[in-house]
Amino acid sequence: MKKIIGVLAAATLMVSAFTGCSSGSGTVATDGSTSMEEVIGALGEAFSETNDGITFTYNPSGSSSGISAVAEGRCDIGLSSRDLKDEEKESGLQETVLAYDGIAVIVNPENPVSDLDLETIAKIYTGEITNWSEVGGNDAEIVLIGREAGSGTRDGFESITETEDICQYRQELTSTGDVITTVASNPDAIGYASVASIKDSVKALTVGGVEATEESIKNGSYVIQRPFIMVTRTDTELSEAAQKFYDYAISEDAKEIITSAGVVPAN
Amino acid sequence: MVTNMNSKLFERIVHGIFLILGLITVASVLVITIYLIVSGIPAIAEIGIADFLFGTEWKSTAEEPKYGILPFILTSVYGTAGAILIGTPIGFFTAVYLAKLAHPKVKRVISSVVSLLAGIPSVVYGLVGMLVLVPAIRDIFNVPDGASLLAAIIVLAVMVLPSIIKVSLTSLEAVPKEYEEASLALGATPIETYFKVSVPAAKSGIAAAVVLGVGRAIGEAMAVMMVAGNAANMPGLFESVKFLTTAVASEMSYSSGLQRQALFSIALVLFLFIMLINAALNFFLKREKED
């Protein structure tokens, strides 16, 4: 019996994953970045709790397809984990920064290295630098820890360091916790994880001398970060329900939820 | 007359209910099989069966994705073989000891510990492996990182022990006492009797135990994912590797499009492996009955 329920549940999930987003009265349809799944899911859940009768949907399709979905009117709010390009803005879209996603580069506390710049980090992850002694550490091989293909953190890290698809991972782990545990237990490991989830068992590196704090992520001086934005059209007004969600997402109340999803609220 | 009719009707209804309950299992298997085949075939067709099965590169999210699962197949085969190679002797001798030599009290204690081992959730195996075994391998073998095929083999070897011990034990205990008594009466020592009479008499059951262990090892995902490193390398003892199971499990949650379909295709390949193992198991069990 359980199996059948499982199969049915899986099938329902599959179906819901393939249905696009449609707008209508009493619904808020969002579409876009898979990296924003956690934060938008938490916001959507909290929003639905206080607004009975409004259906909230989120279609994790990727930043670019979310932007085109809102441009073509297939959803109310597009979600993107990169800034809008100029031509996208010219086509009648505007962005509102919802939050900043800061990614910390972590090493074992025993590691004497405490600062690397972005370029060096990219060289380490692409296998150009393979020994800690080349960056002022011990004579030991660097062990690269990363996330699985498709993970939002991996996508963010690789796009910021411009190392997409060329990282020479030694381990690909499926959760932030696993990355932290692994780095904490191997003195030669280096890994990355969202800033909010860093624990004392690992050491977060400063990047180009800048420590990852809420402040430095917000003002952009900490470079391994990217914005999570909501994309709307300039020429059409949001539906009542969508406007309600939009206001809620940038409100004071939403801050705590955004923070608990591991990112820094922008407003 | 009426009561008789009623009780007959009641019998029929109960019969029908039980039949439906029985069919639920059959339906589950059918649904899963059909679902896997339907979702697994398109990607294989699109990628090409040779490129899919024998391609050595898996880059599912790259600009130009590559979907070769040979590293996963070989890793699953090597990992399972390694686990069986380590687990079988330990499990087999434990079973012989428990069945023939152990003091009843010792047997009771060890048997319940073995049952307990079977009940430990795989995530716990993985966690202990990650925190104890992986750093230990790193120190002992002086490699940069301990998450490797070796770590996975050791974890799997422990995980297959309960299946091997229990099934072997049952078949060794089922050997008729007369065989052993005859052997002892002819002057053979107890150890000679156990290994030359009891074990050969139970060989089909022991073979079934090993096959069951293979099934356990090849299907395990969680524990392996935590200790194997999960990079899609061709297998090497100290390499970070990805199994068929972990390839599906680690990417499924974020996948889309062809990548998702390819994951179903991997699941289909894994399913075929399990079917083969089940067929082998049925073969051995049937032989044991005939013996």
Image (cartoon, helix red, strand yellow):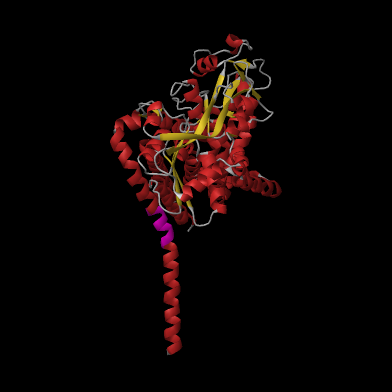
Q: Quadrant of the N terminus of chain B?
A: bottom left
**Would you say residue B28 sits in the magenta stretch?**
yes
Which residue is at a point 51% across and 43% down the rendered structure image? A246
Expressed as whole percent of the image width and height from the top left, the position of residue B216 reads 50, 42
Residue range highlighted in magenta = B23-30
Expressed as whole percent of the image width and height from the top left, the position of residue A173 reads 53, 31
Which residue is at a point 47% across and 50% down the rendered structure image? A240
Q: Residue furthest bottom?
A: B1
Tell whether A6 sits left or right of B121.
Answer: left
Viewer-side residue, A46 vs A174:
A46
- Is residue B175 visible to the viewer in this orientation of the structure? no
The number of numbered discs placed on residues in the rendered structure image is 0
Tell whether B12 sits left or right of B90.
Answer: left
- Is residue B52 visible to the viewer in this orientation of the structure? yes
**Would you say residue B240 sits in the magenta stretch?**
no
Expressed as whole percent of the image width and height from the top left, the position of residue B287 reads 42, 49
Q: Is residue B181 above or below residue B91?
A: below
Viewer-side residue, B167 vs A79:
A79
Tell whether A200 sits left or right of B18.
Answer: right
Secondary structure predominantly adopted by residues drawn in magenta: helix
Rendered image quadrant of residue A187: top right
